[in-house]
Amino acid sequence: MTVLAPGVRLGSYEILTRVGAGGMGEVWKGRDTRLDRLVAIKQLKVTNPERFAREARAVAALNHAGICQIYDVGSDYLVLEFVDGEPLRGPVPIDEVVRLGVQIAAALEAAHRRGILHRDLKPANLLLTRGGGATGELPAIKLVDFGLAKLTADDSGATQTAEGFIAGTPAYMSPEQAGGKALDTRSDVFSFGAVLYELVSGLRAFGGHTLAETISAVLREEPAPLSAPAAVQKIVMRCLKKAPEERFQTITDVKLALERIAPEPAVPQPSIAVLPFANTSGDKENEYFGDGLAEEIITALAQIPGLKVTARTSAFAFKGKEQDIIEIAEVLRVRTVLEGSVRRSGNRVRVTAQLINAADGYQLWSSRYDREMTEAFAIQDEIAQAIVTTLRGHLASDVTPARRYTPRPEAYEMFLKARYQLAQFQPHAISRGRELIERAITLDPEFAMGRQELSSYYLHQALIGDKPAHKMMPLARASALEALACEPDLPGGHALLGVIAGLYDYDWVEQSRRFALALAREPVSPEVRAFHGTFRLLVLGRPVEAAAEMKRALEADPLNLVHRVQLAMSLDAAGEIDEAEAQLRQVLELNERFFPATEWLAIHAAFRGRFDQARGYVERTLEILGQQTRFVGLLAAILEQTGETDRARQLIDTLGSGDRYGACTELMVLHLLRSDPATAAHWAVKAIEQRDTYVVILLPTVVGEALRKGPEWPRISSLLNPGDTLTT
């Protein structure tokens, strides 16, 4: 076997860079020096050269737009079409699931007609070609990697290699493939169903922490129900039947079933990101107004059916950064961007705004407004209406953005200043933000959004452990109820009460009712979805659904780091350990001091026995935050495991008798990492009685796994569960 490296020549092919590697070999980017074109060269670990060459020639004869072409074959390598694309990932909208599913099925159909099984169908072998983004072009699928392909005419049929290993990827194997039995085209149908399941949900149909657990799930377990239209769910679940005779008998049958529910090709959805308006006043004190103006326009546009609007957190991530509009649009996956500036002088304000087409950088619309500050609402409404008018030909309806309530100008100004302060995430700024919200409410008692913001502040204080829940949660509830008294259908108000009902009252029936009200009207905000995914679905032991909900929240708010950490928590609980860790590392790439990510990386590593790695993350967390009770038990347990018993003992002493708020949860974590679930259960009960919100969040994750499997769980569950069913 030739050792490949940049600059090496393999016949007429020049090796450029290594693209990736797997169990079957390595893939390199190369150049065909004869035709001066890029190619992909896959060097394989070949145990049967004659059979490899015969099957490679058969695959090379395939000629289908959805199949990566084979240009050449050597003794242990394939020369392939170089595909500029990325592996397929879910979740995607149902219409897109159907569109891509038809393409994949058509590619498999072409292979099956030639008597070729793929045997390793999975998202990593389905490349989504470049497209979409700001231009609106629809990406297409390329089926790659026929390294495990087998001719159906080969009666050996076995799926085991000469070394005795099962060939394929366990999570996507059919039961007969996992069992080392003979295969036919119905095995690819099963794998296709597993791919469709992941496209719909964003999660694997069959998970497991180990190879054995994954294969066991494929052989014995049924996948969790999908949140999808009945027709789609029926197709996916039929593909995933354990017995081949109960599945679709050919991939053509699957393709026809998908085509029957496929909608007509649609114009790409109009989408927009509203960037914070630049403050050109020369006075930093006026910066709040530009941020508030952008946020109010986002809120107004989010009401328009058919218009995808990037949420505030992601749009504001580019504040103060010199970045090209087209690049911003590509990151946020939008087709238009609104940017502008604000200049305030006394009671006068000048606002400029321009709507930019992200495909070419040209203006679609621009305007300037010279008004009194008291006319701020009119400016916001006029800009929102101008955008709708400009995009009208691409929208499904002719809706005019409507203002739910117009607060008194002075109250509104206090509200904008409050939100600006709260967004700083600094203790003094957060305290100042609360004071400003209270002033806004005093100036306008009917201002529902002000009362909702105050409720959110109190809830946040309880969730991060800054203040005891028994002090903050009643205040949060009172403010949310006051907000709903002003606006009874306020989704955020119902969502806040849903979180309180679950994490504080342990009343899951009331929580269900509140979230039903919060989710009743489209569009659902990313924050409401995140509340529902984390504080209901995950807490109730439904991590697959929780992860799917978090991915939907991130579709509209892709740079929201809190939501991405919450997604990682759900993925970890669902057994998607590698993807969970990848999400957390992605957060740190965006903000290396984002402590929720370092905290969960520490938990993720510690509860899987990687204590040296966990120690680095928890030390980093404490360095960011200072010594907090919430992380002391975790660090103490890690120090014990790594031999620093004296320092561990000093930290444990700070927890005292556990009376201090939060200490019981830390003692629970300590004893779980000591492999002492009986003592951990004692502290879990104490933490629940203390109404520590953190313990409710930890129990359904990897932290609480030993408790959920132990004899004390029924007692713990009964304390949390007067009206619903928690995970067992």
Image: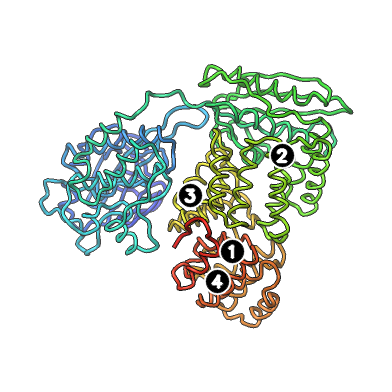
Q: Position of residue 424 (x, y in %)?
A: 74, 47
Mark 4 to mark 3 CA distance (whole Å) = 28 Å
379 left or right of 573 in image = right
Question: In terms of secondary structure, where does tag 4 sit?
Answer: helix
Question: In terms of secondary structure, where does tag 1 sit?
Answer: helix
Q: Amino acid at mark 1?
A: Val
User: Residue at horizontal 68%, vertical 57%?
Assistant: 462
Residue 328 visible in the current orientation: yes
Which mark sits nearer the N-terminus, 2 or 1? 2
Residue bearing mark 1: 695
Which mark sits nearer the N-terminus, 1 or 3? 3
> Which circle marks residue 612 in the picture?
4
Mark 1 to mark 3 CA distance (whole Å) = 20 Å
Q: Position of residue 309 (x, y in %)?
A: 58, 32
Residue bearing mark 3: 547
Q: Position of residue 492 (x, y in %)?
A: 63, 41
Which mark sits nearer the N-terminus, 4 or 3? 3
Mark 4 to mark 2 CA distance (whole Å) = 38 Å
Q: Quadrant of residue 24?
A: bottom left
Q: Amino acid at mark 4?
A: Asp
Tell us which disc is closer to us: 1 or 3: 1
Q: Quadrant of residue 186?
A: top left
Q: Amino acid at mark 2?
A: Gly
Residue bearing mark 2: 320
342 left or right of 33 in image = right
Q: Are marks 2 and 1 in contact (CB under 8 Å)?
A: no
Which mark sits nearer the N-terminus, 3 or 2? 2
Tell us which disc is closer to us: 3 or 2: 3
720 or 653: nearer the eye? 720
Mark 3 to mark 2 CA distance (whole Å) = 32 Å
Binning the other alpha carbons within 10 Å of mark 1 as few (below 14), some (14 to 19) or many (20 upward) gives many
Tell us which disc is closer to us: 4 or 3: 3
